[in-house]
Image: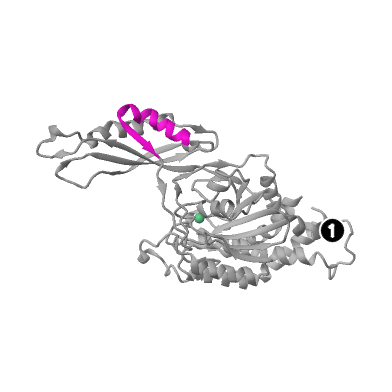
C-alpha cells in the first residue's frame, strides 16, 4: 500500500476500537429483539435507527422490508448483506443463557442470532460507519502528519463519488435465502456491482456454496374401498420403485471439482389421509443438493428421465414466502449453487483487504450451507464473496455466540474493503 493507504488503515483500526461500545450496544439490542423469519419488523426499525446514527446519506426500507442504508453517491454499488432473521428456538432449556438476553462472557457475546447473523449486521453497519468518517475526512487536510501529498488525496476524495456502499439488514434468509435480495434487485431496482455476505467465515473468505432445491415426485392411482383392493390401484405401491430409483440416482449426479458430488434424499412422503381406502395418490419430497451450474430445467429433466417411465411426475414446488411488510414473494424452491472464479477482482480485493489490515493472506474456502448468494451469484450472476466474524460451529446452536475481537476485526475489513476494491 502507499503511505496514504497505510494512513487509512491506521485510522480505520483506531476508529474500530473507539466505536467498540456503540457497536456492541447495537449488537446487544439486536439480540434482545426477537426476529424470527417473516417477523423482522422491530429488528429492521432498530437497524434503521443505527444506520441514521452512523451518518448514512440515505436510510430506507424496500418492499420486502429489508433495512437499507447508503454511504456515498457513486453509481457503482457495493452491497453488504447480513440477515436480521433468526431460526426459532427449539428448546430454551438447552441454552446456557436465555436466548434473547445478550450476555458477554470472556471475549464473546452470547445470544440468539449472534453467529447467524446479527454479528454480521453489527460488523457491516460499523464498517460503513468508519468508512463514512474516513472517506469524508479525506476532503479536509490531515490534522497531523504534515503535508498530504497531492497525488494521494484526490483518490480518497473520489471514492464516494465513484462508489456507494449499501448496507442491508436482510429479511427472510433462513426460510428462503435470496428471496428478499431478489426483491431488492428485481422489484426495487438496486443493482449492486458486487455483494459481500457477512455470514460465518471466521474472518476467512468464502467464494461459493452448494445449492439446493426441492422436487415433488407424484404417482397417481385409483381409490377403492380397502375391503376390495382389486377395484383400485395403489399409488403407494407405484411409488416404491420410484423411491428406489431416486435413491439410485445418487451414483450418477453431477460432480464438481470443488464441491464434490451433488446428492438427493427422499425426505417426506404423503398421501390422502384415509386409512380405509386404496390411496389414489402419493407424493414424495426430494431434497437435492446442487453443484454450481445446475439449473431447474436440468434437475427436472434428469429426475423425469428416471421416474417418468415408472409412471411418476416431477415438479419443483412453489415456496410460499410472506415478508413482514405483507408482500408475497412466493417463488420456486430452487437455490442455485455458485463459485466465484479464482481470478475474479472481487476475490483479489478481499485478500488484499485482509492482508493490508493483518499482514496475512486469509484462507479461501466455500460454504457448506446456503446463503443469499444463491440469488446474487447463483441466479443474478453478481460477483459475491463471503466474509464474517462469526464461527460456523455456533450457527443454529444453543451456545450461539460471536467473538468480540473478531467482530471488531470484521468491522475493519468492511471499512477498508471499498478502497481495495476501487484499486
Ligand atoms: Zn445466516
Q: Residue at x 39, y 28 (%)?
A: 305
Q: Is residue 299 magenta?
A: yes
In the displayed structure image, the side of residue 268 where residue 146 appears, left or right:
right
- Give the quadrant of residue 242: top left
| Residue 246 x, y percent position in the rendering | 35, 33
- Give the quadrant of residue 258: top right
| Residue 341 x, y percent position in the rendering | 63, 39
- Give the quadrant of residue 77: bottom right
- Of 297 and 421, nearer the camera is 297
Specify whether residue 105 is in view. no
Q: Is residue 8 magenta?
A: no
| Residue 184 x, y percent position in the rendering | 57, 55
What residue did someone put label 1 on?
154
Toward the top, the furthest residue is 309
In the displayed structure image, the side of residue 401 where residue 408 appears, left or right:
right
Does residue 332 lie above or below 323 as drawn? Answer: above
- Of 18 and 323, nearer the camera is 323
Q: How is the image coloured?
A: one colour
Specify whether residue 60 is in view. yes
Tally of marks: 1
Question: For mark 1, does the 10 Å Cα neighbourhood hold few (<14), some (14 to 19), or many (20 or more) residues?
Answer: few
Q: Ligand 1 closer than 8 Å to the CB at disc 1?
A: no
Decide whether the magenta segment is chiefly helix, strand or loop: helix
In the displayed structure image, the side of residue 358 where residue 305 appears, left or right:
left
Q: Residue at x 41, y 52 (%)?
A: 320
| Residue 160 x, y percent position in the rendering | 75, 59
Q: Magenta residues?
A: 297-315
Q: Residue at x 50, y 69 (%)?
A: 42
SS class, disc 1: helix
Amino acid at each position: 500500500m502507499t503511505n496514504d493507504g497505510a494512513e487509512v488503515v491506521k485510522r480505520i483500526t483506531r476508529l474500530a476500537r473507539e466505536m467498540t461500545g456503540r457497536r456492541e450496544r447495537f449488537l446487544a439490542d439486536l439480540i434482545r429483539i426477537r426476529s424470527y423469519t417473516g417477523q423482522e419488523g422491530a429488528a429492521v426499525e432498530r437497524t434503521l435507527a443505527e444506520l441514521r446514527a452512523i451518518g448514512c446519506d440515505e436510510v430506507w426500507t424496500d418492499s420486502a422490508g429489508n433495512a437499507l442504508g447508503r454511504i456515498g453517491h457513486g453509481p457503482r454499488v457495493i452491497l453488504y448483506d447480513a440477515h436480521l432473521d433468526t431460526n426459532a428456538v427449539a428448546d430454551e432449556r438447552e441454552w446456557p443463557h436465555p436466548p434473547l438476553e445478550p450476555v458477554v462472557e470472556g471475549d464473546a457475546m452470547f445470544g440468539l442470532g449472534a453467529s447467524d447473523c446479527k454479528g454480521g449486521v453489527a460488523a457491516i453497519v460499523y464498517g460503513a460507519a468508519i468508512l463514512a468518517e474516513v472517506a469524508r475526512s479525506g476532503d479536509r487536510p490531515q490534522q497531523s502528519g504534515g503535508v498530504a501529498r497531492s497525488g494521494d488525496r484526490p483518490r480518497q476524495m473520489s471514492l464516494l463519488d465513484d462508489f456507494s456502499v449499501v448496507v442491508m439488514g436482510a429479511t427472510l434468509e433462513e426460510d428462503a435465502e435470496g428471496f428478499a435480495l431478489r426483491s431488492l434487485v428485481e422489484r426495487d431496482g438496486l443493482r449492486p456491482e458486487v455483494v459481500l455476505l457477512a455470514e460465518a467465515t471466521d474472518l476467512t473468505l468464502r467464494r461459493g456454496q452448494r445449492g439446493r432445491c426441492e422436487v415433488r415426485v407424484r404417482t397417481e392411482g385409483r381409490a377403492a374401498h380397502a375391503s376390495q383392493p382389486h377395484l383400485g390401484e395403489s399409488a403407494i405401491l407405484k411409488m416404491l420403485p420410484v423411491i428406489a430409483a431416486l435413491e439410485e440416482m445418487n451414483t450418477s449426479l453431477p460432480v464438481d471439482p470443488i464441491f464434490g458430488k451433488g446428492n438427493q434424499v427422499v425426505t417426506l412422503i404423503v398421501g390422502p389421509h384415509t386409512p380405509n381406502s386404496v390411496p389414489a395418490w402419493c407424493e414424495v419430497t426430494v431434497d437435492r443438493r446442487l453443484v454450481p451450474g445446475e439449473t431447474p430445467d436440468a434437475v427436472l429433466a434428469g429426475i423425469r428421465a428416471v421416474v417418468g417411465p415408472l409412471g411418476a411426475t416431477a415438479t419443483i414446488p412453489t415456496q410460499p414466502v410472506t415478508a413482514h411488510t405483507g408482500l408475497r414473494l412466493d417463488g420456486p424452491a430452487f437455490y442455485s449453487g455458485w463459485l466465484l472464479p479464482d481470478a475474479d477482482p472481487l476475490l483479489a480485493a478481499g485478500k488484499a483487504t485482509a492482508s493490508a489490515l493483518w499482514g496475512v493472506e486469509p484462507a479461501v474456502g466455500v460454504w457448506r450451507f446456503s446463503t443469499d448468494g444463491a440469488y446474487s451469484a447463483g441466479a443474478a450472476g453478481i460477483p459475491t464473496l463471503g466474509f464474517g466474524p462469526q464461527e460456523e460451529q455456533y450457527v443454529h446452536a444453543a451456545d450461539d455466540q460471536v467473538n468480540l475481537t473478531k467482530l471488531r476485526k470484521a468491522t475493519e475489513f468492511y471499512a477498508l474493503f471499498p478502497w481495495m476494491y476501487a484499486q
